[in-house]
Image (tube, rainbow, N blue to C red):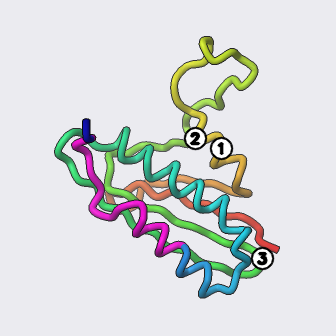
Amino acid sequence: MDDPRAAETDLSTLMGELTSAWDAAGLPVDARFPFELALEEIFVNAITHGATAGETRHFELRFSYARPRATLVLRDDAPPFDPLSLAAPDLAAGLDERGMGGLGIHLVRELMDEVSYRRVDGRNELTLSKHID
């Protein structure tokens, strides 16, 4: 069954934008993976939890690099939601004891040096940054 929720900008387009900006900054390819994984996690969560059947969501990506920090800003037009407000998952609990959700944003927090959220002009904005050698 196909999911009727959709994004105006698809994940492959956003990944292409990230790759182009990354390459233009002359950054090492192997250092891009944490940003790709974070982008995928945030995108999928926004589509899965921030859209209902028949809705289309719009996403924007901005990437910048100011030595030594790479910064990725993701914006979407989903209803207000701060994923950083979620409690950290109990990783010591067994799978059947854990509640659903929370692992993705936990992973993003672990991959990045800084993660912040704000609501700007009716959009969710998540900023991710990491030191790149």
| Residues at marks 1 and 2 touching, judged by CB atoms closer than 8 Å | yes
- Looking at marks 2 and 3 on the same chain, the residue that comes earlier in the sequence is marked by 3
Mark 2 residue crowding within 10 angstroms, few (<14) / some (14–19) / many (20+): some
What amino acid does circle 1 point to? Leu
Residue 55 point in image, percent of width and height: 20, 48
Distance between mark 2 and mark 3 Cα atoms: 25 Å
Q: Residue at x 70, y 52 (%)?
A: 111
Q: Where does label 1 land, which residue?
A: 107
What span is colored magenta in the figure? 3-18
In x, y percent, where is residue 68? 77, 76
Instruction: Classify residue 128 by image quadrant.
Output: bottom right
Find numbered disc 1 in the image and state the secondary structure of the residue it sits on. helix
Q: Which amino acid, mark 3?
A: Pro
* Figure quadrant of the C terminus: bottom right
> Which numbered disc flags the more N-terminal residue, 1 or 3?
3
Task: Residue type at mark 2: give it.
Answer: Gly
Count of numbered badges drawn on the protein? 3
Q: Kindly state the secondary structure of the residue where label 2 is placed.
A: helix
22 to the left or right of 57: right
| Tag 3 residue | 68
Circle 2 residue: 104
Q: Residue at x 27, y 51 (%)?
A: 6
- Residue 14 inside the magenta-drawn segment: yes
